[in-house]
Image: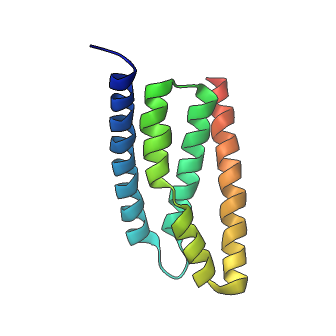
Amino acid sequence: MDGPLEERGVTLLLVAAGGALGSLLRYVAASALDARWPRGTLAVNLAGSALLGLLVGRDTGDAAYALLGVGFCGGLTTWSAFAVQTHDLGPRSGATYAAVTLGSALAACALGFWVGAQA
């Protein structure tokens, strides 16, 4: 019996699987690279922004978007850690980190979208 309920269940599983993998990768990157300056968090936010832009630009379909866009990119990227780290860096370094993160994440997303649209 296939229908909307079964499709929704598959979508939820795809989101959960992607989210688990993205969260694990975020943890590994932050553990390895974050120190005085949160390079790991910056790296995962840029990678996730680029990948999400690519997926949207390429129009990969619902299942791939659920797995990779919502799940993986949602688990990989982090707004909460970015906010806390920005605060913890203090006014000057925090403002620099925020500007670098926001500007480069938007640029990465735009580049990913452009590359995806070319395919």
Kindly identify the residue that appears in the image at 52 percent across and 25 percent down.
Answer: 60
From the top left corner, tell me how far across and down residue 99 is, in percent: 73, 67
**Which residue occupies the extreme left position in the image?**
1
Q: Nearer the viewer, residue 58 or 15?
A: 15
> Relative to 7, is 54 above or below?
below
From the top left corner, tell me how far across and down residue 67 is, in percent: 41, 36
Kindly identify the residue that appears in the image at 33 percent across and 31 percent down.
Answer: 9
- Is residue 88 toward the left or the right of residue 97 in the image? left
Q: How many marks?
A: 0
Q: Nearer the viewer, residue 1 or 57?
A: 1
From the top left corner, tell me how far across and down residue 114 is, in percent: 69, 34
Q: According to the image, what is the colour scheme of the structure?
A: rainbow
The image quarter in which residue 11 lies: top left
> Relative to 43, is 83 above or below?
below
- Assign the C terminus to one quadrant of the image: top right
- Is residue 97 toward the left or the right of residue 9 in the image? right
Kindly identify the residue that appears in the image at 52 percent across and 82 percent down.
Answer: 36
- Is residue 28 toward the left or the right of residue 60 in the image? left
> Relative to 116, is 111 above or below?
below
- Is residue 44 toward the left or the right of residue 100 in the image? left
The image quarter in which residue 52 lies: top right
From the top left corner, tell me how far across and down residue 8 is, in percent: 39, 29
> Relative to 28, is 95 above or below?
below
- Assign the N terminus to one quadrant of the image: top left
